[in-house]
């Protein structure tokens, strides 16, 4: 009798706590619809965290890397760091009368953003250099913090930090709860992201990798400062992403998350490692709640990457199908 | 009566656990002699970790940066990364017949290390480039792991990883136990350190900052690799250290530890921040158990830094006086 009672008790225990555990797993990603994408994430995490399994990965090696623009937050109608730079050009214009006759600034100041950016990457780079350099790192941080806490998105009229993807916030938390170290590896500037990523994503500055301009150590009246120079230090895109991961993390990730061809090499580098690997593309398919774009988009273009993801069986998130909500404010 | 018993009990509790807590603090640094250096470390940690104090620093901001050569492990008779490069030159010599007539290789192969290094930094750079480049990052990691687990120091005949400083290992643990994030910021190469720093210092690759050579992403038969190029990417010394801290950590440290003029700017940058700051120089004063050198040494020279440390009241560790043991094997 005692044994029977014990068995019943044990069974009850297993049932209650077993289902609690299952419920917890399900609840970790409440903004994800059930489906292949969500399932693949949960299965991968279970695989690498199961003690004793040949696929077990020690926490120190559970490196997960995330692109930012278009993967963790929106990037339309234009990368947000470009929108910041445009705002800066307008603010700095009185000090730069020469900009009235000089592209890309002239078009920009006339409100013709499209014309200004017709020069492509070179034009963007010129705008970024003119607006990001010539001050100390502390001065820039203050400018950045002011902008990110007040500037509004042209369409939604919301703060940019409100345009982060709720399902991805849950994914970041879920991975960290399972011992992962989460890094950002973005084409955007490091100093554009670091003032707010800890608060918004739970990712501290030292885990934010991005593009950078050069800085120089100088003594100003006996006080050391770092001065920002109008010279590109590193462009963290495409082939640059695995390079930056190597130089700054020093370990190959086991999971990588992106949304464009600019992330393809990062996903290739991640999945080429031995043992279980995970690669995920966020596919922008929701023209109503967000934007729908891929192969032909000048912002966040996803063409080769989509083919390779399909060929290799990487996880592709269909935003329209897979996400119950896009932004945090849509949560009930 | 009840109240008296309770008071006695409470008092006993406070006494027992109070002294336990005190004992724990003392025990965290058992290889440090009591003195100003040890006291200053303990006081600083108490100051920044005391909740409610105006000097309290949240754990996320408790960044501590350590130089490696001469601060965490020895660096005589020559920086260990140079000794590694010399071993590599000898191993690679058969594939480079031209080295017989080319400095600095010719001298090196004749056993004349001093002559080879007479060319100064340029000679060291040439040796490093010739031995560190032209292979993938994974191939280099294997070479490095083999060397560090077998090569012996010319004087002590011990593994290089046995020539780390026991008091500094205790300090690293003590800081981490108090919520600090510990980083290496070294003039040595990142890939020379990362294969062993986690095991030896408890510092994972992503917290190791150092000098680097460029790497390039390439596809070899459909497999992505990173190829090491014979081109300096970043020299992490002097003014380079605050720059690297900014670019890779993105937050000003509150504590910095070095041993040479190459660390001076890192200590200046750290202490120029607002709020409580800590700077410490390890002064090599023990010619018997280790080495004694400072102002005139070509390796780990400490001249301007020593003056500034004295003028500003930074902590100066007198190795001979302050450390009970130097290396782990001396522990009783």
Image (tube, coloured by chain):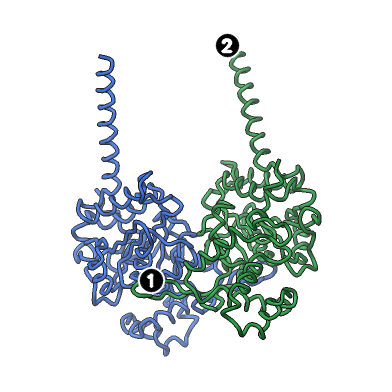
Chain colours: A green, B blue
How far from the left and from the top, in percent, is residue A131? 58, 74
Tell me the element at label 1.
strand
In-front residue for pair B74/B314: B314
Of the residues tagged 1 and 2, which is closer to the observer? 1
Which residue does the image show at 66% across and 38% down from the upper left? A27
Q: Identify residue for label 2.
A: A2
Residue A165: x %, y % from top left: 68, 52
Can I make out residue A135 in this image?
A: yes
| Rendered position, B23 above or below B241 | above
Q: Say whether mark 2 and mark 1 are on the same chain.
A: yes
Q: What numbered label is drawn on residue A201?
A: none
- State left or right for residue B239 relative to residue A71: left
Q: Label 1 belongs to which residue? A: A224
**Residue located at (44% from left, 59% from top):** B196
Please name whichever residue, B265 or B103, is drawn nearer the observer in this view of the structure: B265
Q: In which quarter of the image is residue A82?
A: bottom right
Quadrant where the N terminus of chain A sits is top right
Describe residue B192's horizontal placement relative to residue A266 as left or right.
Answer: left
| CA distance for labels 1 and 2 | 75 Å
Depicted A275 relative to depicted A246: above or below: above
Q: Is residue A35 left or right of residue A232?
A: right
Q: Residues within 10 Å of mark 2 (few under 14, many from 20)?
A: few
**Position above or below: B204 against A175:** below
Position of the C terminus of chain A by quadrant = top right
Does residue B215 appear in this view?
Answer: no
How busy is the neighbourhood of tag 1: few (under 14 within 10 Å), some, or many (20 plus)?
A: some
Task: Give the mark nearest the N terminus, 1 or 2.
Answer: 2
Chain under label 2? A
Query: Residue at the spot x=43%, y=64% of the render?
Result: B193
Residue at the spot 24% in from the left edge and 52% down from the top edge: B39
Q: Where is residue A299 in the image (x, y as percent from the top left)?
A: 73, 67
Give the percent coordinates (x, y) of residue A130.
58, 77
């Amino acid at each position: 009798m005692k044994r029977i009672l014990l068995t019943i008790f044990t069974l009850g225990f297993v049932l209650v706590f077993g289902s609690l555990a299952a419920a917890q797993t399900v609840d970790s990603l409440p903004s994800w619809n059930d489906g292949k994408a969500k399932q693949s994430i949960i299965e991968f995490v279970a695989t690498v965290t199961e003690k004793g399994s040949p696929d077990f990965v020690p926490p120190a090696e559970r490196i997960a890397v995330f692109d930012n623009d278009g993967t963790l937050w929106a990037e339309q109608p234009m990368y947000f760091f470009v929108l910041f730079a445009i705002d800066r050009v307008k603010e700095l214009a009185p000090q730069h009368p020469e900009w009235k006759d000089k592209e890309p600034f002239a078009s920009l100041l006339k409100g013709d953003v499209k014309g200004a950016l017709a020069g492509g990457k070179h034009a963007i780079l010129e705008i970024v250099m003119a607006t990001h350099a010539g001050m100390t790192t502390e001065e820039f941080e203050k400018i950045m913090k002011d902008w990110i806490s007040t500037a509004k998105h042209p369409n939604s009229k919301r703060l940019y930090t409100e345009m982060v993807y709720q399902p991805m916030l849950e994914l970041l938390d879920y991975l960290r709860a399972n011992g992962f170290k989460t890094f950002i590896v973005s084409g955007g500037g490091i100093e554009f992201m670091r003032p707010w990523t800890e608060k918004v994503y739970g990712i501290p500055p030292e885990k934010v990798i991005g593009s950078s301009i050069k800085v120089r150590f100088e003594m100003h009246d006996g006080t050391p400062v770092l001065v920002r120079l109008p010279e590109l230090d590193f462009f963290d895109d495409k082939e640059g992403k695995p390079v930056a991961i190597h130089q700054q993390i020093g370990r190959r990730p086991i999971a990588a998350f992106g949304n464009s061809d600019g992330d393809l090499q990062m996903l290739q580098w991640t999945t080429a490692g031995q043992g279980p690997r995970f690669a995920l593309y966020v596919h922008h398919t929701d023209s109503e709640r967000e934007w729908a774009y891929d192969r032909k988009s000048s912002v966040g273009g996803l063409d080769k990457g989509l083919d390779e993801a399909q060929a290799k069986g990487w996880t592709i998130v269909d935003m329209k199908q897979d996400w119950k909500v896009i932004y945090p404010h849509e949560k009930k």
